[in-house]
Amino acid sequence: MALLDDDFLLSNEISKKLFNDYAKNMPIIDFHCHLNPNEIYENKNYANITRIWINEEHYGDHYKWRLMRANGVPEELITGDGADYDKFMAWAKTIEKSAGNPLYEWTHLELRRFFGINETFNTKTAPAIWEKANKLLQTDDFKPRSLIRNSHVYAVCTTDDPASDLHYHKLLKADERQNGFRTLPAMRPDKLIQIERDGFGDYLKTLSKVSGIEITNFDTLIKALHQRFEYFNDMGGRLSDHSLPTYHFHEANTEELNNIFKKGIANEPLSQLEIDKYLTMLLENLMKLNKEFDWTMQWHINSVRDINRPMFDQLGPDTGYDAIGTQPDIVLHLQKLYTKMRDTNDLPKTIFYSLNPNDWMELATMMGCFLEGGVQRMQLGAGWWFNDTAEGMHEQLRVFAEESCLPNFVGMLTDSRSFLSYPRHEYFRRVLCNFYGELAEQGRVPDDVEYLGKIVQDISYNNAYKFFDFFDDATPQELFN
């Protein structure tokens, strides 16, 4: 089999038919990513392929950065001030050594799907690829909005701080018919969760100003958050996202909570128990707000961040120094939280992603205890980050299928900062079609391509379209075509 030929990841005739006749051309709803709405609005061409592939203007691709470090590339050619061409060649040299890594496949997929470049990427072919790609990048088809539209994407959900004025979302909303897709905000309150960090009090001042509510205690914080939920909701927001590297369920009474809150504002030291109590009460209220506004609450759990402290001090977060978390009882504490919130009927729609796959069975069975009425309101999210591989995707599909109703799954997301990441949806769809193709080959599901084709189309697009309701009962075709 040739590299990335038409049948790659597809091991039998059923899977090939499912992909080519059913999944391949379905639209995309990218309900979680880290694209910058500023870049989408400004819609500028990138100077060269390094700037869109390795080091973008506002951030970079820490997946690639980690791999380049593993290949001994000096930091000057990763995040430093080395020449763009030299960084590109360092990436080519790294790819030569990365066979078996998903980045090897993603890199070649992006070259083929966006640039029409079918050569194997290595140090010999890289100079010609540099020239061809850079010429294409200066055309209108390679501006951010075109890259999104030409990837058949109908909705992009960015990741936004509660204090954001969503200025660029407003501007993009006015252009959405011309753009051919919607750019929607998704709230991520990391700075509220991190009460122990410097700047918590200053951040509350910013949130007070933008919400119009002076935050003096925990109750006024929740009132300010309610205002931000209203604002985001009016702008089309339908999701929140919560990074929870670790978590322990401990509730607090009003007096305890306000004392902890005051210490956080003053940047006084907090014990782990105090942090846990604040976080538990904040999450309970965030769950109530998500339920009130009928949003989907996403949880990204069990990671460990910024292990290499000197490099974090030098480069900041999201630069390739994170790993899989190992809190063994994190799901137990989330069970306590969800049991408490079920008692008050405050469970929102939920998607759980754990960076540690050891949590997946626990999460799937836990969520099964809270599935009551309507759509499948709680879901095990797609393989995330270090699990964003063919094997990781297959394992997540297996767990979901064995413990719940996989045909209701809302499917893939890019979780990316790059406009060239949409082939990840193709990659996922190939794994999905192969998953069902293998089941059919083993006689475990009917050898009925129409039946299975409907399932893979639903997981690829239809379920997300219905689940998130980004289009207010209209269809994207009605809005954009």
Image (cartoon, rainbow, N blue to C red):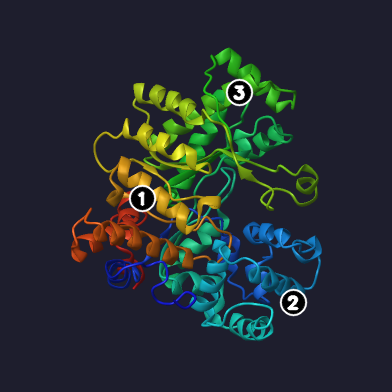
What numbered label is drawn on residue 468?
A: 1
Density class for disc 2 (Cα within 10 Å; few <14, some 14-19, many ≥20) is some
Q: Amino acid at mark 1?
A: Phe
**Who comes first in sequence, dot 3 or dot 2?**
2
Q: Nearer the viewer, mark 2 or mark 1?
A: 2
Q: Earlier in the sequence, mark 2 or mark 1?
A: 2
Amino acid type of disc 2?
Answer: Tyr
Question: Of the residues shown, which amino acid type is indicated by label 3?
Answer: Asn
Q: Secondary structure at mark 2?
A: helix
Q: Quadrant of the N terminus?
A: bottom left
Residue at image location 34% in from the left, 66% down from the top: 479
How far apart are the two marked residues, 3 and 1, measured between alpha carbons?
Answer: 33 Å
Left or right: 81 in relation to 473: right
Viewer-nearest of discs 3 and 1: 1
- Mark 3 lies on a secondary structure that is loop
Q: SS at mark 1?
A: helix
* Frontmost residue, 72 versus 457: 72
Residue for point 50% across, 50% down? 384
Q: Which residue was labeled with disc 3? A: 217
Does residue 284 appear anywhere in the picture?
no
344, 325: nearer the viewer: 325
Q: Quadrant of the C terminus?
A: bottom left
Residue designated by label 2: 85
Measuring 57% from the left and 29% from the top, which residue is drawn there?
221
Tag 3 and tag 1, C-beta contact below 8 Å = no
The image shows residue 259 at horizontal and vertical percentages of: 65, 17
45 is higher (above) or lower (below) than 206: below
Image side of residue 15 versus residue 228, left or right:
left
Residue 179 seen by the camera: yes
